[in-house]
Image: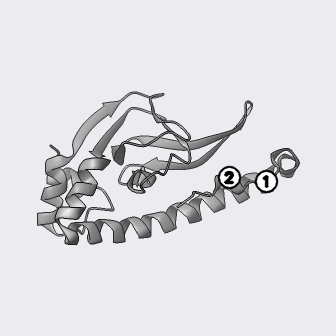
């Protein structure tokens, strides 16, 4: 169980009605991970939805053995593992702790059960996730474009970048 006060530090949860925060808190777990811990890998099933209470998690893709692109860095107050909520979807990146992290995790099977039992919770959560997803995609696009601007010779080596877009 996680304290409601901790959930309020997460942007996704901070203005959610208190009774819904309490439901989420009752099923969430707080874990501490050391730097270098891999939470999930590209193309794996994701079993948890994560919220970063403290620390930084990189979502990255290895394009070639010597070329890894950090798609985004998830900092304190933000969430990741959104694809865990889409049935059959697999991780679009590898998640690795860049420093010691305190992460709030929710098992996706329990979270989806909670959504089915409380439609208001499902709506509130998914509405906020849609806004988060919009921000993630904007950040990812900016980072890729910045990297390609700084290293135009890389574009020739990469080929088609279509595989970086998540499948929904």
Number of numbered discs visible in the structure rendering: 2
Q: Quadrant of residue 69?
A: top right
Viewer-closest of 40 and 77: 40
Under circle 2, the secondary element is helix
Point out residue 66 in the picture as x, y percentages from the top left corner: 74, 31
When the figure is inspected, residue 10 is found, relative to residue 28, above or below; the finding is: below
Work out how far the residue at label 1 is from the one at label 2, CA to CA, in angstroms: 8 Å
Q: Which residue is drawn at 47% across and 64% down?
A: 133
Under circle 1, the secondary element is loop
Point out residue 20 in the picture as x, y percentages from the top left corner: 16, 64
Instruction: Tell me if 164 is positioned left or right of 17 in this view.
Output: right
| Residue with the mark numbered 2 | 163
Q: Residues within 10 Å of mark 2 (few under 14, many from 20)?
A: few
Q: Which residue is drawn at 42% across and 43% down?
A: 46
Viewer-closest of 94 and 74: 94
Q: In which quarter of the image is the N terminus?
A: top left
When the figure is inspected, residue 117 is found, relative to residue 3, above or below; the finding is: below
Give yes or no for contact between labels 1 and 2 (Cβ–Cβ under 8 Å).
Answer: yes
Color encoding of the figure = one colour
When the figure is inspected, residue 61 is found, relative to residue 163, above or below; the finding is: above
Q: Quadrant of residue 19?
A: bottom left
| Residue with the mark numbered 1 | 160
Q: Residue at x 58, y 65 (%)?
A: 138
Q: Residues within 10 Å of mark 1 (few under 14, many from 20)?
A: few
Instruction: Tell me if 30 is positioned left or right of 79 in this view.
Output: left
Q: Residue at x 84, y 51 (%)?
A: 155
Point out residue 112 in the picture as x, y percentages from the top left corner: 28, 56
Q: Residue 66 carries which label?
A: none
Instruction: Tell me if 118 is positioned left or right of 157 in this view.
Output: left
Point out residue 156 in the picture as x, y percentages from the top left corner: 88, 49
């Amino acid at each position: 169980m996680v304290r409601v006060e901790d959930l309020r530090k997460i942007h996704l949860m901070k203005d959610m009605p208190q009774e819904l925060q309490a439901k989420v808190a009752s099923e969430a777990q707080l874990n501490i991970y050391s730097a270098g811990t891999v939470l999930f890998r590209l193309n794996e099933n994701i079993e948890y939805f994560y919220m970063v209470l403290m620390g930084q998690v990189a979502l990255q893709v290895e394009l070639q053995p010597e070329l890894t692109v950090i798609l985004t860095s998830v900092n304190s107050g933000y969430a990741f593992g959104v694809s865990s909520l889409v049935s059959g979807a697999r991780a679009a990146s590898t998640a690795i702790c860049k420093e010691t992290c305190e992460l709030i995790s929710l098992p996706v099977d329990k979270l989806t059960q909670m959504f089915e039992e409380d439609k208001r919770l499902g709506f509130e959560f998914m509405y906020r996730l849609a806004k988060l997803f919009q921000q993630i995609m904007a950040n990812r696009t900016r980072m890729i474009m910045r990297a390609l601007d700084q290293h135009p010779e890389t574009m020739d080596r990469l080929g088609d970048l279509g595989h970086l877009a998540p499948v929904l």
